[in-house]
Image (spheres, rainbow, N blue to C red):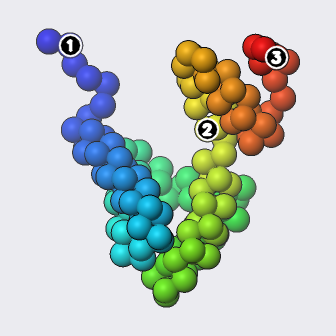
């Protein structure tokens, strides 16, 4: 049986991140339910820490070019906890976009392989990331 490239802690971290995403989506669907959004944030942070480790997580969030995103993310979480879920969620999304915006082109390249809608998703993510692509969309 082939071995996986993820350790057991990383597999658990993926589960925590996935559950965090589900709770965040559920919190949005439930009209910005404060407790579901808070639980999603907690699960996401625990999962991220389990996937890349405590030191790398701290280093990622404390990088000089990521401090603006980290501040927005933390401020958004605090606003959610202080009963401003819609405003907090929007500020948190801005922080996540700043923190993880570098990965949008990678996600776009992966999504480009999806039949029919893939090229459109790829182009949209490249535009959001600020990159330019010479490839034209099929008509």
- 75 shown above or below 42: below
* Quadrant that contains the C terminus: top right
Mark 3 residue element: loop
Identify the disc placed on residue 2.
Answer: 1
Decide: few, some or many residues near mark 1? Use Cα within 10 Å; few <14, some 14-19, many ≥20. Answer: few
Distance from disc 2 to disc 1, alpha carbons, whole Å, reads 28 Å
Evaluate if marks 3 and 2 touch, with contact meaning CB atoms under 8 Å apart.
no
Which of disc 1 and disc 3 is earlier in sequence? 1
Q: Position of residue 127 (x, y in %)?
A: 78, 37
Which residue corresponds to mark 3?
Answer: 136
- Residue 59 point in image, percent of width and height: 54, 55
Q: Nearer the viewer, residue 120 or 60?
A: 120
Does 54 appear above or below 89?
above
Any mark on residue 103, and which? 2
Place residue 43 in its image quadrant.
bottom left
Which residue appears at 64% of the width and 69% of the height? 91
Residue 109 visible at all: no
**Disc 2 secondary structure class:** helix
């Amino acid at each position: 049986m082939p071995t996986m490239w993820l350790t057991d802690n990383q597999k658990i971290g993926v589960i925590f991140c996935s559950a965090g995403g589900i709770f965040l989506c559920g919190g949005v669907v439930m009209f910005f339910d404060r407790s579901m959004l808070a639980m999603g944030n907690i699960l996401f942070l625990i999962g991220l820490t389990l996937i890349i480790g405590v030191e790398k997580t701290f280093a990622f969030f404390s990088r000089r070019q990521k401090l603006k995103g980290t501040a927005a993310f933390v401020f958004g979480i605090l606003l959610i906890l202080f009963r401003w879920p819609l405003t907090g969620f929007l500020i948190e999304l801005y922080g996540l976009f700043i923190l993880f915006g570098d990965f949008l082109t990678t996600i776009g390249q992966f999504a480009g392989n999806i039949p029919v809608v893939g090229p459109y998703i790829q182009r949209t993510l490249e535009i959001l990331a600020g990159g330019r692509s010479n490839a034209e969309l099929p008509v």
